[in-house]
Every structure is written in C-alpha cells, then in structure tokens.
Image (spheres, helix red, strand yellow):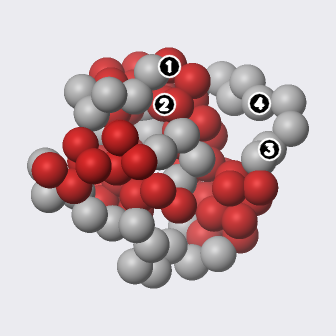
C-alpha cells in the first residue's frame, strides 16, 4: 500500500468514506472531476463501485492504481486523492 500524504481531508473525501458506496457516480470520489469522469464513462466505468473494484483487483497498490487511473486523464494528485479515499473507505466498510 502507498503512503498516505494528506494533511486535511476534503469535504468530498469525508463524505465519501463515511457512507456506503451504493450507486454513486465516479465524481463522488475525490480526485475525479468532470473530464476524468467523462473519460471513465467512455470506458464503461459509470459507478464509483467500478473504481473500487479495480482498486481491489489491483490489490490496493498505489503504483498500479495510479498507472490505471492516469489512462483516463488523472494526474498524480487526482490519483492520490482517489486512492486515499478508497483506502479509508475500505478500512471503514470492508476490513
């Protein structure tokens, strides 16, 4: 797992990690804005749980997750924000 480097979690982060994932769109994840969401949807990734599934498939590995998410236009900061939220969500709801 990667090192979490976040000083103060954003409101988007806090809202995401405390709730069930349900049918949320990708934009409910920190780091996923409109452009990245459009690119994800173009690849059939239409729900936040699809991104969670890839995060789990990649064994919660920051480097692999970052490499995957960058294919949709994310930069390192976007990837880190999304990864941090998924790690915390996983710890709160699945671990």
Residue 9's label in the rendered image is 3
Which residue is disc 1 drawn over? Answer: 76
Q: Is residue 29 above or below residue 68?
A: below
Q: Earlier in the sequence, mark 1 or mark 3?
A: 3
The x and y percentages for residue 58 are 31, 38
Instruction: Say what secondary structure mark 2 lies in.
Output: helix
Instruction: Say what secondary structure mark 1 lies in.
Output: helix
* C-alpha gap between disc 4 and disc 1: 13 Å
* C-alpha gap between disc 1 and disc 3: 17 Å
Q: Is residue 50 above or below residue 20?
A: above
Nearest to the observer: residue 47 or residue 54: 47
The x and y percentages for residue 59 are 37, 40
* C-alpha gap between disc 4 and disc 2: 12 Å
Which residue is disc 2 drawn over? Answer: 79
Residue 6's label in the rendered image is 4
Q: Residue 12's quadrant in the figure?
A: bottom right
Regarding residue 35, the answer to whether it shows in the image is yes
Instruction: Say what secondary structure mark 4 lies in.
Output: loop
Q: Earlier in the sequence, mark 2 or mark 3?
A: 3
Q: Residue 67's quadrant in the figure?
A: top left
* C-alpha gap between disc 2 and disc 3: 14 Å
């Amino acid at each position: 797992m990667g090192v979490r480097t976040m000083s103060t979690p954003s409101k988007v982060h806090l809202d995401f990690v405390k709730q069930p994932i349900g049918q949320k769109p990708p934009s409910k994840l920190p780091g996923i804005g409109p452009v990245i969401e459009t690119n994800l949807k173009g690849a059939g990734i239409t729900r936040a749980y699809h991104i969670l599934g890839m995060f789990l498939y990649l064994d919660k590995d920051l480097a692999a997750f970052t490499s995957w998410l960058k294919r949709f236009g994310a930069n390192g900061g976007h990837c880190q924000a999304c990864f941090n939220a998924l790690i915390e969500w996983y710890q709160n709801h699945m671990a």
